[in-house]
């Protein structure tokens, strides 16, 4: 339960932060039954599954209404073991359990969503991914793990 609450805290911070949406917009979308469409870049972390569950599972007591993960760009880095060894498992869960549409590019993802979470484990990819999101004029939240920061430091 503590892990779920920790993820909830992190994700609420992501969703209601000014870089994605305001708390008022989130409440308005929940009331209008038009959820904010969230896209995720990088499916190589268990965090993306936890975030998606919080938003997409209304039967969960930890559910956060008003936004929904609807699409994702798989991403991944073959030379980063923490990415390459886990990406297929998390991608399959996002597609099969949470019905998240997989797209072939960041540009295609941007056309399908209102806001983006960059969650790729490999921090080297974040700048280029963010540039594509900015060019599409989408709101973006950068999320990384300790592994992602270590990858940036090494390179």
Image (cartoon, helix red, strand yellow):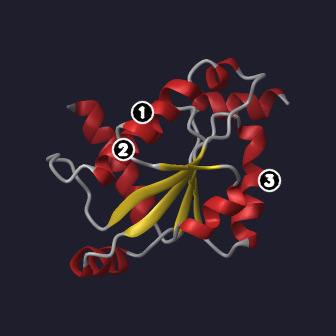
Give the quadrant of the N terminus. top left
Give the quadrant of the C terminus. top right
Image side of residue 58 versus residue 81, left or right: left
CB-based contact (under 8 Å), mark 1 and mark 3: no
Q: Earlier in the sequence, mark 2 or mark 3?
A: 2
What mark, if any, has residue 125 been given in the picture? none
Image side of residue 113 versus residue 31, left or right: right
Residue drawn at (62%, 21%) of the image:
82
Crowding near pointer 1: few (<14 within 10 Å), some, many (20+)?
some
Query: Measured along the vertical axis of the image, is residue 59 above or below residue 107?
Result: above
The residue that disc 3 covers is 128
CB-based contact (under 8 Å), mark 2 and mark 1: yes
Q: Which type of secondary structure does the marked residue at label 1 adopt?
A: helix
Q: Which type of secondary structure does the marked residue at label 2 adopt?
A: loop
Q: Earlier in the sequence, mark 2 or mark 1?
A: 1
What mark, if any, has residue 98 been given in the picture? 2
Query: Measured along the vertical axis of the image, is residue 98 above or below residue 45?
Result: below
Distance from the alpha carbon under mark 1 to that under mark 3? 26 Å
Q: Which type of secondary structure does the marked residue at label 3 adopt?
A: helix
Q: Earlier in the sequence, mark 1 or mark 3?
A: 1
Crowding near pointer 3: few (<14 within 10 Å), some, many (20+)?
few
Q: Nearer the viewer, mark 2 or mark 3?
A: 2
Residue drawn at (63%, 27%) of the image:
147
Seen from the viewer's position, the closer of residues 115 and 97 is: 97
Seen from the viewer's position, the closer of residues 93 and 128 is: 93
Distance from the alpha carbon under mark 2 to that under mark 1? 7 Å
Which residue is at the far right?
A: 155
Residue 51 placement (x, y as % from top left): 39, 46
The residue that disc 1 covers is 93
Residue 127 placement (x, y as % from top left): 77, 52
Residue 52 placement (x, y as % from top left): 38, 47
């Amino acid at each position: 339960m503590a892990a779920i609450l920790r993820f909830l805290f992190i994700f609420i911070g992501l969703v209601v932060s000014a870089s994605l949406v305001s708390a008022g917009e989130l409440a308005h979308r929940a009331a209008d039954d038009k959820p904010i469409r969230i896209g995720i870049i990088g499916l190589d972390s268990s965090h993306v599954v936890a975030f998606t569950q919080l938003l997409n599972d209304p039967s969960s007591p930890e559910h956060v209404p008003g936004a929904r993960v609807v699409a994702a760009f798989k991403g991944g880095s073959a030379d980063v073991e923490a990415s390459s060894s886990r990406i297929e498992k998390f991608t399959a869960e996002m597609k099969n359990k949470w019905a998240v549409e997989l797209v072939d590019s960041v540009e295609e993802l941007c056309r399908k969503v209102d806001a983006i979470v960059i969650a790729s484990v490999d921090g080297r990819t974040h700048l280029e991914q963010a540039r594509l999101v900015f060019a599409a004029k989408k709101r973006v939240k950068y999320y990384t793990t300790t592994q992602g920061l270590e990858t940036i430091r090494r390179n």
